[in-house]
Image (tube, rainbow, N blue to C red):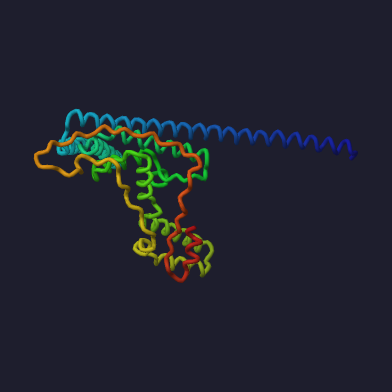
């Protein structure tokens, strides 16, 4: 075979592989396009859902203020709503959760502040997300503690309802996030350790190494109480600038103070904010703790 014939064969094979390869890449790109579109659609649906739920909570709070509904009236009406539902299972559970949220927003302790709390939660959470996009190394304490902006919003409503605590500043939210940091939650940490044990069991089943079984037994002996004792002191809830009228000392025969209108300061932009000092990982005394620390790192 001459060099010319050999080169012609190689060119033919090259052309064939090129055509097939680009067809495969086209199929992969099409899948990616469809997947990205699906993700965008899901995000848009989630945004729409939570935007609607935000509006409904504010609507319920406003109606409760205007109607001057009592806690007893709200609870009685909510009970009737649940009793009227003939569905069971997931539908009934979802209605119970939604009704519980609406009750919290309508509660006399919280209803006057729901709109402002929504603004505060949205501004702070959105700003944190935008700053994290600009600098991926920036901490995201609100997302770490609450995962979603809506979850933070509901927690703020419950704080007003149950604890008579009304948050008004971004710094107060950051302190509240530190209080709810899952790294200080012994129960969550114990669940995390349980997952490590499950992974070790699966590994041992595939590869029965005695050392793995020994580590598994050592970790299994760690209790939630042991973790709680090893955790450094958990941050306290912040002292709030605003005092709820119902929490203020009452004077005999004095009129009940009106709930003030809160003006929320705009959260300042974060530019090169200092990172909080790194927390040391809790250590638990034991013979195999060096191995444990590597496993949960």
Residue shown at the point (43%, 57%) measured from the top left: 195
Does residue 40 sit above or below 213 in this rendering?
Answer: above
Q: Nearer the viewer, residue 113 or 62?
A: 113
Furthest residue toward right: 2
Furthest residue toward left: 253
- Counting labels gives 0
For residue 117, side relative to residue 290 (left or right): left
Q: Nearer the viewer, residue 204 or 45?
A: 45
x, y percent for residue 58: 28, 31
x, y percent for residue 185: 36, 55
Does residue 247 sit above or below 61 in this rendering?
Answer: below
Q: Nearer the viewer, residue 21 or 65?
A: 65
x, y percent for residue 216: 45, 65
From where the camera sits, is residue 88 visible? Answer: no
Say which quadrant the N terminus sits in.
top right
Residue 193 occupies quadrant: bottom left
Residue shown at the point (41%, 31%) measured from the top left: 45
x, y percent for residue 281: 45, 59
From where the camera sits, is residue 246 visible? Answer: yes
For residue 5, side relative to residue 34 (left or right): right
Residue shown at the point (22%, 34%) measured from the top left: 259
């Amino acid at each position: 075979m001459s060099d010319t014939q050999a080169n012609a064969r190689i060119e033919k094979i090259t052309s064939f592989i090129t055509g097939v390869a680009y067809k495969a890449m086209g199929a992969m790109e099409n899948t990616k396009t469809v997947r990205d579109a699906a993700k965008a659609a899901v995000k848009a649906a989630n945004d729409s859902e939570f935007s609607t739920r935000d509006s409904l909570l504010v609507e319920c709070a406003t109606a409760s203020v205007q109607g001057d509904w009592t806690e007893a009236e709200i609870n009685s009406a909510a009970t009737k709503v649940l009793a009227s539902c003939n569905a069971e299972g997931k539908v009934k559970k979802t209605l119970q959760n939604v009704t519980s949220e609406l009750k919290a927003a309508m509660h006399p302790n919280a209803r006057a502040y729901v709109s402002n709390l929504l603004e505060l939660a949205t501004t702070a959470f959105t700003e944190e997300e935008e700053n994290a996009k600009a600098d991926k190394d920036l901490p995201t304490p609100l997302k770490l503690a609450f995962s979603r902006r809506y979850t933070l919003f509901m927690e703020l409503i419950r704080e007003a309802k149950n604890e008579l605590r009304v948050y008004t500043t971004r710094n107060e939210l950051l302190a509240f996030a530190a209080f709810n940091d899952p790294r200080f939650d012994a129960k969550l940490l114990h669940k995390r350790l349980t997952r490590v044990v499950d992974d070790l069991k699966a590994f041992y089943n595939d590869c029965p190494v005695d050392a793995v079984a020994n580590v598994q037994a050592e970790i299994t002996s760690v209790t939630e109480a042991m973790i709680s004792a090893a955790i450094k002191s958990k941050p306290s809830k912040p002292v709030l600038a605003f005092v709820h009228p119902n929490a203020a000392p009452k004077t005999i025969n004095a009129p009940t103070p009106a709930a003030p209108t809160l003006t929320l300061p705009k959260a300042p932009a974060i530019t090169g904010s200092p990172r909080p000092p790194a927390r040391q990982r809790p250590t638990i005394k034991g013979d195999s703790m060096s191995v444990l620390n590597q496993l949960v790192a």
